[in-house]
Image (cartoon, grey):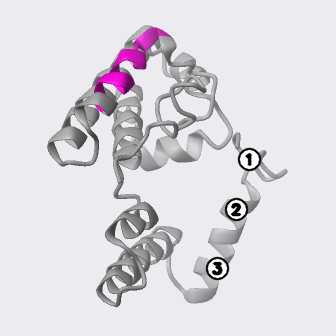
Amino acid sequence: QGPMPPTSGGKTWMELYWQALAQKLGITVEKLQQAMEDARGQAAQEGVKQGVLTQAQADRITGNTANATIVNAGLDAAAKALGMTRTELQTALRTKSLLTLAQEKKVDATALRTAIADAQKAAIDQAVKDGKLTQAQADAMKAKLKPENIDLNRPFGWGIRGGMPGSDFGNKG
């Protein structure tokens, strides 16, 4: 899925939805999103305790997988290289590519690709240490994870095969 087109007011439908829901609840969008994330984690933990979910299922629900960790490491590295927070970058990526953002912020595209690749390689190594990936899985991912393979025009998290390290990573278990 690519970036959602903005409405005539410059916001996506989803942004308008979050805004309207937060307003009805009398909280900020950030607090609403945090509450939803917290509730998802709490429900997943309770699901494991009650035998409704396996730990692997709960990890996928909460984003506590090797894939999510690796994608987030790249996202954080991209945000830092672009002088943005992760939230600012995620918002910008709804309507712009990483390449466009790099050009706007006068950040060298090769440096951006290298920062993403280096951060994701470190996250892959950590995933092996944490038992979320086997060394063989990590080696296969890192063999494909080269700065020149990162397509800054694709939506973030498409996976190595799609040109951006992220969603095609396998998970152990």
Q: Callout 1 environment at 10 Å: few (<14), some (14 to 19), or many (20+)?
A: some
Mark 2–mark 1 Cα distance, whole angstroms, equals 8 Å
Disc 1 designates what residue? 4
Disc 3 designates what residue? 21
Residue 128 x/y as whole percent: 21, 39
Asked which secondary structure carries label 1, the reply is loop
Asked which secondary structure carries label 3, the reply is helix
Mark 3–mark 2 Cα distance, whole angstroms, equals 11 Å
Q: Residue at x 79, y 53 (%)?
A: 9
Left or right of residue 5: residue 135: left
Picture quarter containing residue 114? top left
Query: Mark 1 or mark 2, which is nearer the start of the sequence?
Result: 1
Q: Are marks 3 and 1 in contact (CB under 8 Å)?
A: no
Q: Do the residues labelled 2 and 1 touch (CB within 8 Å)?
A: yes
Mark 3–mark 1 Cα distance, whole angstroms, equals 19 Å
Start and end of the magenta stretch?
138-148
Residue 108 at least partly seen: no
Picture quarter containing residue 120? top left
Q: Is residue 140 magenta?
A: yes
Disc 2 designates what residue? 14
